[in-house]
Amino acid sequence: IFRSYQIHGQRTAASQVWVQNMSLYLGAAIGTAGGVLLPRLFAKRASAQRTTRATSVGANPSAPDVIPVLSEKEYLRNLRSKRVEDPGFFALYSSFAGGIVTDPALMNIPLDDHMVHRGHGVFDTATLVNGMLYGLDTHLARFLESAKCARIHHDFTKQRMMQIIEQTCSASGKRDASVRYWMTTGPGDFSFVPYRCIEPCFYVMVFGGLPMDDEDLDKGISEVTVKGVPMKPPLLATMKSNNYLLNCLTAMEATDRGGRFGILVDTDGTIGESCVMNVAFVNAGGVFVTPLFRNILSGTTVRKAMELAQALVETGELKGIEQRDVYESEAREAKEMILFAGDSHITPVTEWDGQKVGTGEAGPVFKALNALLDEHIRISSTATQLRVRYVH
């Protein structure tokens, strides 16, 4: 009766008779209220449907224009029109597509890839320096461990991934760039488990680098303690997963309050990390101290810095090197505070929560470590770097 009453949103004589008869029947069964209310309810439904239909066909003058259904040519044209300026994206490899593209408009992944809608993916980085991939083996070891922790079952070997990364760099034509790569459970559906995914996917992007690459941070930055964002649980903190929402919120709060990357302090008063950087201190006793990797990422840059800092112990510039719990009370008395990330990024913090760190200028340990790291990257042997063969 209800459907016949709504035919094309209009009352027909036949439908009104049906409604009246059924209303009388129901009224006798459940009281006179049924005979009165049911026609009104049906009228409300029909009225609402007529209103909705009128809006959908553009009867409302303020209704938006009809959204076009795009052809392949139109879709690509629209994507390219959004890339008016060069975004600094040089090449993308997609195992799902089976190759490399160099047109930024084509550097997309499927929306149903579980990395996109569930965060079920991991990533890592590398640095292309003068045609050499620095520390790739170390990064890939961490990458594969992250994939294992995320239960991404795949057939990619480390050797195969090195070949893919090398060839993507070759296709980019760049000798100096940043490289980022992802492993995902792949596309297939919008479920929260990956059991119907088509295949695990490996993506590689060669790009110009993060904004910090273009800035002179050697003179020091101001930082703030971020209190409005919790630290990640250990599983996500120690795995380089694609879930970086807390990292983003940390940086945003820091920026809002005059900082840059933010400093996280755990509930027990121990120093954690920055949004995407490890933090270390030269304490009041001249010891280089950095937090344990128990609840934070095992950063490759700070690990390398601890190795190189041994030379500073030998020269007496440092009294020692320790990785342990660093309490905020100790950190506040430090002579130097340094952030580490991205193979080559070492940034001194000269002001923390409005108070000078040490002298308020970049300290001698920072300067020495920065020089040691630059030299290490420059003279590292092929045992620690992969030379790109430019074949494209």
Image (tube, rainbow, N blue to C red):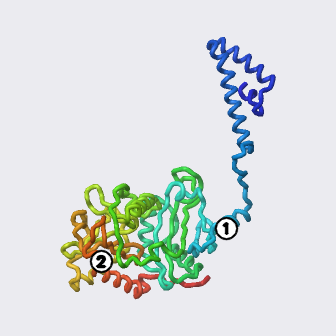
Q: Earlier in the sequence, mark 2 or mark 1?
A: 1
Q: Residue furthest right?
A: 13
For the point 21% across and 84% down, the residue is 316
SS for dot 2: loop
Q: Residue 252's image quarter? A: bottom left
Q: Relative to residue 324, is residue 370 depicted above or below?
A: below
Residue 99 visible here = no
Position above or below: 307 against 151: below
Residue drawn at x 73%, y 21% as measured from the top left: 19
What is the total number of numbered labels drawn onto the structure image?
Answer: 2
Q: Name the kind of residue labelled 2 in the image.
A: Glu
Quarter-of-image position of residue 306: bottom left
| Label 1 sits on residue | 81
- Compared across the picture, whether 254 is left or right of 267 comes to right
Question: What is the x, y in percent for residue 287?
Answer: 22, 75
- Residue at the extreme front of the image, as rendered: 61
Check contact, mark 2 vs mark 1: CB within 8 A: no
Task: Tell me the tag on residue 361.
Answer: 2
Which label is found at residue 346? none
Q: Position of residue 130 (x, y in %)?
A: 49, 85
Residue at mark 2 to residue at mark 1: CA–CA distance:
45 Å
